[in-house]
Image: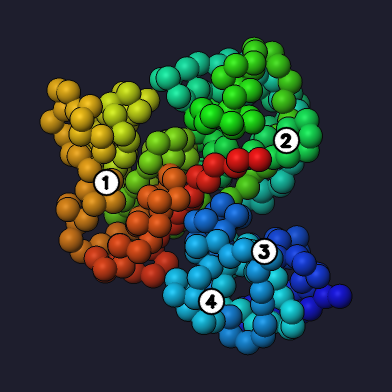
């Protein structure tokens, strides 16, 4: 059984199959709807449901509760349809045609950046290049077919190799493998690019916020903006627990020193470990609104763990952040 979904603003219709998410159906048929994590955590794909019925499989994640979404809004990455449906959602346009690929790759190098973050550099076959937009991610395909998503840390113009920042988690299938077993020249398989956490056209100043390894896609976006001489000012906040968690602090500091339009503010949350620290402390989203009481003239790019993204989504509208000016990607740890 299938139903028809209509994008009301664009007067475009597409078919949604039984038990297929609205987002998957749209993507399959070439309609570029906004999304981020695809697992119901980041809220990037929330859209208004004008008419028709939808439901969610299994237990609803916190983001799907009525008080968060309202009666006629849905997370398109999780919502299934039980009738024909009309949706109000924006379609994204990209300057280039990006092709989803599955590619073999070889581990060129690994480097522990601190006790819990490893940089992995992958090399593609000489005849292949992965075209992607800054901030996108790829899926690592595991031998059992399961997938683990990691953001690309290099900008698109440096695609001879691919850079990833992998955080160690107890019980994390890929992270434990990466830290304990992954060797140079090992063969891996990836699929991508995926995601729409990328640089959007605008004239508004940019605030970028990273939590932990959320620095990886921010690095890709910033380095791309420098390559294309984007004139917009960037204020980058990096939230971490301790100084060692600012695992590439030197790179972010160099941006601010070299480029007058970039400001860098690291924020540490574990004050018990703030030896020789004179910078900002506390939660990174609170540091932002301490500096910006009015966000109406800014675009905000945020990437990090779900609690950070949730705090930004719930808090920043109180500081007049305009609808459509928040671009986020939530890093959800896959336990299985």
Query: Could you tell which of marks 4 and 3 lies nearer the N-terminus?
Result: 3
Locate residue 197, reporting x and y percent: 50, 51
Q: Specify the label residue 177 is tagged with.
A: none
Real-space CA distance between mark 1 and mark 2, rounded to the nearest whole angstrom: 34 Å
Kindly state the secondary structure of the residue where label 2 is placed.
strand
Query: How far apart are the two marked residues, 3 and 1, measured between alpha carbons?
Result: 32 Å
| Image quarter in which the C terminus is found | top right
Q: Secondary structure at mark 3?
A: loop
Q: Residues within 10 Å of mark 1 (few under 14, many from 20)?
A: some
- Label 4 with label 3: CB-CB less than 8 Å: no
Residue 329 appears left or right of 59 = left
CA distance separating discs 4 and 2 = 32 Å
Which residue is at 66% across, 51% downward?
97
| Residue carrying label 4 | 73
Tell me the residue that label 3 is attached to: 58
Q: Rounded to the nearest whole Å, what is the CA distance between mark 4 and mark 1?
A: 29 Å
**x, y percent for residue 88:** 56, 78
Report the mark closest to the observer, 1 or 2.
1
Q: Which is more N-terminal, label 1 or label 4?
A: 4
Residue linked to disc 2: 141
Residue 87: name its quadrant.
bottom right
Q: Nearer the viewer, mark 4 or mark 3?
A: 3
Question: In the rendering, at what x and y percent does residue 235 appear?
Answer: 27, 45
Circle count: 4
Q: Secondary structure at mark 4?
A: strand
Q: Which mark is residue 283?
A: 1
Q: Quadrant of the N terminus?
A: bottom right
In front: label 2 or label 3: 3
């Amino acid at each position: 059984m299938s139903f028809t979904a209509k994008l009301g603003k664009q007067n475009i219709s597409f078919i949604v199959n039984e038990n297929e998410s609205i987002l998957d159906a749209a993507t399959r048929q070439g309609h570029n709807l906004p999304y981020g994590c695809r697992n119901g955590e980041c809220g990037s794909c929330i859209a208004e449901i004008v008419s028709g019925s939808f439901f969610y499989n299994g237990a609803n994640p916190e983001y799907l509760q009525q008080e968060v979404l309202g009666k006629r809004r849905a997370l398109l990455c999780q919502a299934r349809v039980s009738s024909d449906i009309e949706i109000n959602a924006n379609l994204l346009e990209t300057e280039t045609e990006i092709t989803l690929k599955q590619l073999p790759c070889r581990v060129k190098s690994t480097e522990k950046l601190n006790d819990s973050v490893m940089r992995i550099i992958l090399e593609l076959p000489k005849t292949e290049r992965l075209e992607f937009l800054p901030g996108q991610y790829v899926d690592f395909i595991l031998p059992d077919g399961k997938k683990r998503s990691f953001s690309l840390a290099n900008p698109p113009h440096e695609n001879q190799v691919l850079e990833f920042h992998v955080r160690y988690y107890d019980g994390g299938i890929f992270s434990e493998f990466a830290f304990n077993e992954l060797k140079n020249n090992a063969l891996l398989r990836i699929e991508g690019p995926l995601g729409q956490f990328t640089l959007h056209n605008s004239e508004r100043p940019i605030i970028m916020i990273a939590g932990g390894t959320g620095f990886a896609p921010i690095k890709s976006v910033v380095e791309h903006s420098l390559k294309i001489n984007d004139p917009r000012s960037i204020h980058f906040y990096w939230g971490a627990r301790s100084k060692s968690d600012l695992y590439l602090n030197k790179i972010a500091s160099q941006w601010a020193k070299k480029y007058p339009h970039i400001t860098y503010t690291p924020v540490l949350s574990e004050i018990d470990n703030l030896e020789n620290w004179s910078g900002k402390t506390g939660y990174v989203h609170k540091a932002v609104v301490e500096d910006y009481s009015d966000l109406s003239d800014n675009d905000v790019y945020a990437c990090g763990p779900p609690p950070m993204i949730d705090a930004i989504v719930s808090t920043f509208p109180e500081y007049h952040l305009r609808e459509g000016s928040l671009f986020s990607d939530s890093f959800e740890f896959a336990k299985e």
